[in-house]
Every structure is written in structure tokens, then in C-alpha cells.
């Protein structure tokens, strides 16, 4: 299927799957263990019905949203994704530039395959930085100082990785650090010449922000220790709040009491997220976790939601359940995999056109007016 005939994010995913070796496709497409949580994220969206109202003037639809004092042209942004250049060469820069052009936020991952400095430049004022708290406090402080120097205004600290998720597909594909060339890898490279050539040209993807530190890593455990810590606690979050002068968000919140604690510690917002179903298989879909959180917070701090958004209407479903803003990870990533920069643009256009169409069909002229009443019409 050509790019122009891709009608949905799922079509782009199918196209990406055909162009990328399995081990690299699964790296992004996969979820934790049985992948139940990942599947449920999208299914739970689909189960929510929004009833249209008619004879409302929707000739001029406004999909913009304001967040932390910045006006964005659409109510969603690009979630942080680590090592995305392994999926498609230059994916990080393609998406950062796309978000800048479309005037939506781009979140640079700590574990990105491009340095946070280059991504700040490419995102051109629309970049936020996602922080993994390391077991080494110097590593964490080093990243924060670099994020400050690169002029990021929003720091999004990820809370939902006390341990790395167990991704069965990666184990089956023998995806290991250091990377090993297995017969399956060789077969995948031969079967996908376009990907292989482009990857060869751009060089082996690394976790760029830690490139020097990881030079000496000989096992996955070494890499994990540098990137994350099981010892990240509320006291550390309090210290981070004191340390970071800009906007501070906590990503990976699923429980109303945790959301309240974030508000009490002075955070500016939370991201209701289950890491796209990549951390646990047994947790709730985010759209189900959201209502009690929104009720508890009662507008105290901003709520962003991600995990499972594949349709424009999902953004409205999230809004109707109490989210101020949304993020998507894989939807835009599939676009890149389906066709590089053009594919990313196609994914962006599909989401935005679906969003505008859904607003019109519901009889709502402005995204800002979508509210809980949409669920009970
Ligand atoms: C391949 C991949 C890598 C990811 N890497 C990170 C990361 O480095 N930091 C982080 O906070 N979240 C990471 N996430 C989670 C995303 O930020 C986001 O929560 C998730 O993709 C949302 O679900 P969706 O893909 O269904 O939209 C990653 C997700 C994927 C798919």
C-alpha cells in the first residue's frame, strides 16, 4: 500500500511492519508480557461512545489548546521514545522537526538516540525533556544541567520504571546489549534492504545522551543501572521540585493518591500513562484510570494522558474524561516507519483530520468546549 492510500494509523503500522526487520519493529510495537495492557489501552477507548448533536454551526473548528502558558495548534504532542532511530534512521529528528512545524510539543527522551541538545534545536521552542532518574545522582544532575543549558522549559520525570518492563518479543528476538548479530537478524537485514541501507548510512543507533558512560557497559544490567533506579522515591521528587525551576511533570501516574501527592509536592501536572502497556501486563488502561484521578485533582494541576491513542476521537474521549492534553507515542512512530518524514507527516495529518472531523460531527466548534457532558448526552 502506498503512503497516500494509508487511511489510518493502523494502515501506517501495517506498512511499517513490511519495511522494517522484525527485531526492530517489535522493539517499538511490543508490550509487556502477554501484551494485555497494551491491547486494552486501545480497546478501552473504542468502548467509549460519544453521541453527536446536530444543527450547531461547526464551519470554523478550533482544535488549539493552551498548556503551561503556551498555545499549541493541536491538543496532543509526541511522547518520549528511547532509541527510536533503531526503528527508522533519523526518526528522532524527523519527529522533533515535525512537532515544531505543527506547533505541538515534542518530548525528548533521556534514552533518545539523538542528544538532547540537537533535539532542542530541532524542536525549536516546542521541546520538553523527559528525565529518567539514574541510580547515579551525578548522571541525573548532569542531564538536568544539560536540559537547563539547552533551554528546555518543561521537565517530565518518568516514575513508572522502577524496573525495566519484561517484553517477551524482545527476548524471543534475542535483543540484547551489547547487540548481537543472530541468523534472524541477518535474515531481517537482507529482507529489508531499504531499512538496512539507511541504517548503515546513518550509523549504529546509540543512547546518545549517555554515549560515553555506556561505552564501558558490558551487560544489560549495566545499562539499566545508568538509566534507571528502583530507589526513586517521593523524597527524590521533592528534591527535583526544588532543583528544577521550570514546569515539572510526573509521567506514569495511575492512582488518584499518587496524583494528589504530585500536586501537594508542587508539580505542575501529571501524565496519566502506563508507558503504552510496556511496563506491566496487569494494569488498567489509562482511559479507565483517568476519571478517579481527575475527580481527586479537581483542577489543581494539569492532566495529560497517553497510551493507546490511535484515532482523533480518542483525544476527545480523553478530554471528556478529564484530560487537559494528550500524547501519542507509537501513532507518530508508525508514520516514520511507514515512510520517513513523509510518513510522519501522513500520521500527523490523519490524527488531526480525524480530530477536526470528529469535533464537527459531535457538534462542538472548539476543542476547549469538550467536557464530561459529551459522555452523557
Ligand atoms: C519504543 C518505545 C520507547 C519508549 N521510551 C520511553 C522513554 O524513553 N521514556 C519514557 O518516559 N517513555 C517511553 N516510552 C513510553 C512513551 O513515552 C508513551 O508513554 C507511550 O508510547 C504511549 O503509548 P502509545 O505508544 O500507545 O501512544 C516508550 C514507548 C515506546 C513505544
Image (spheres, rainbow, N blue to C red):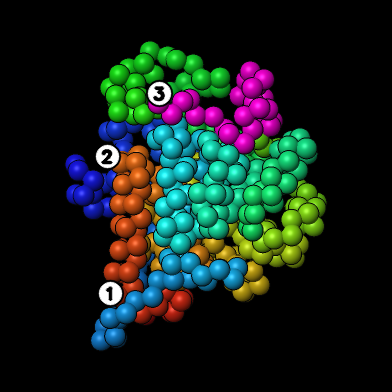
Which quadrant of the figure contains the N terminus?
top left
First reached walking from the N terminus: tag 2 or tag 3: 2
Q: Earlier in the sequence, mark 1 or mark 2?
A: 2
151 is higher (above) or lower (below) than 117: below
Comparing marks 3 and 1, which lies closer to the viewer? 3
* Disc 3, SS: helix
Relative to residue 267, is residue 192 drawn left or right?
left
Check disc 1: other Cα within 10 Å, few if <14, some if 14-19, many if 20+. some
With 323 as the anchor, is 253 left or right in this view? right
Looking at mark 2, is its residue's CB closer than 8 Å to ligand 1? no
Q: Which numbered dot is residue 200?
A: 3
Q: Secondary structure at mark 2?
A: helix
Q: Is residue 209 magenta?
A: yes
Q: Residues within 10 Å of mark 3 (few under 14, many from 20)?
A: few
The local crowd at label 2, few if under 14, some if 14 to 19, many if 20 or more residues have their Cα within 10 Å, is many
Tag 2 near tag 3, CB within 8 Å: no
Residue 47 position within the rendered picture, expressed as x and y whole percent measured from the top left: 36, 61
Instruction: From the image, tell me which residue sits under label 1.
Output: 361
Magenta stretch, overall SS: helix
Q: Residue at x 34, y 25 (%)?
A: 197
Q: Horizontal and vertical percent for residue 175?
A: 48, 23
Quadrant in the picture for the C terminus: bottom left
Task: Give, as a single range, the part of the protein colored magenta.
Answer: 201-226
Residue 63 has which mark?
Answer: none
Is residue 4 located in the magenta-colored stretch of the structure? no
Residue at figure coordinates x 34%, y 76% from the top left: 61
Q: Which residue is mark 2?
A: 15
**From this viewpoint, is residue 178 visible?**
yes
* Left or right: 89 in relation to 191: right
Amino acid at each position: 500500500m502506498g503512503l497516500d492510500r494509508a487511511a489510518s494509523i493502523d494502515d501506517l503500522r501495517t506498512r511499517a511492519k513490511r519495511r522494517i526487520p522484525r527485531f526492530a519493529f517489535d522493539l517499538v510495537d511490543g508490550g509487556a508480557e502477554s501484551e494485555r495492557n497494551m491491547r486494552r489501552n486501545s480497546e478501552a477507548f473504542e468502548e467509549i461512545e460519544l453521541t453527536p448533536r446536530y444543527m450547531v454551526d461547526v464551519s470554523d473548528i478550533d482544535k488549539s489548546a493552551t498548556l503551561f502558558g503556551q498555545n499549541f495548534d493541536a491538543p496532543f504532542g509526541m511522547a518520549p521514545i528511547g532509541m527510536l532511530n533503531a526503528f527508522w534512521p533519523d526518526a528522532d529528528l524527523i519527529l522533533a522537526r515535525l512537532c515544531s512545524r505543527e506547533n505541538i510539543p515534542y518530548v525528548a527522551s533521556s534514552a533518545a538516540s539523538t542528544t538532547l541538545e540537537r533535539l532542542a534545536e530541532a524542536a525549536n521552542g516546542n521541546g520538553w525533556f523527559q528525565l529518567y532518574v539514574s541510580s547515579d545522582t551525578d548522571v541525573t544532575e548532569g542531564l538536568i544541567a544539560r536540559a537547563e543549558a539547552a533551554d528546555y522549559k518543561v521537565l517530565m520525570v518518568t516514575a513508572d520504571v522502577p524496573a525495566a518492563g519484561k517484553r517477551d518479543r524482545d527476548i524471543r528476538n534475542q535483543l540484547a546489549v551489547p547487540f548481537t548479530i543472530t541468523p534472524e537478524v541477518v535474515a531481517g537485514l537482507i529482507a529489508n534492504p531499504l531499512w538496512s541501507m539507511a541504517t548503515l548510512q546513518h550509523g549504529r543507533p546509540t543512547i546518545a545522551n549517555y554515549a560515553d558512560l555506556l561505552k564501558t557497559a558490558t551487560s544489560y544490567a549495566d545499562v539499566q543501572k545508568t538509566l534507571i533506579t528502583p530507589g526513586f522515591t517521593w523524597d527524590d521528587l521533592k528534591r527535583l521540585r526544588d532543583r528544577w525551576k521550570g514546569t515539572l511533570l510526573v509521567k506514569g501516574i495511575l492512582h488518584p493518591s499518587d496524583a494528589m501527592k504530585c500536586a501537594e509536592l508542587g508539580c505542575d501536572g501529571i501524565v496519566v500513562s502506563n508507558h503504552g502497556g510496556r511496563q506491566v501486563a496487569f494494569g488498567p488502561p489509562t482511559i479507565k484510570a483517568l476519571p478517579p484521578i481527575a475527580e481527586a485533582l479537581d483542577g489543581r494541576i494539569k492532566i495529560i494522558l497517553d497510551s493507546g491513542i490511535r484515532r482523533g476521537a480518542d483525544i476527545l474521549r480523553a478530554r471528556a474524561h478529564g484530560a487537559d492534553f494528550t500524547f501519542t507515542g507509537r501513532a507518530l512512530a508508525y508514520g516514520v516507519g511507514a515512510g520517513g518524514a513523509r510518513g510522519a507527516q501522513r500520521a500527523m495529518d490523519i490524527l488531526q483530520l480525524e480530530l477536526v472531523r470528529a469535533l464537527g460531527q459531535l457538534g462542538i466548534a472548539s476543542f476547549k468546549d469538550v467536557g464530561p457532558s459529551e459522555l452523557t448526552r
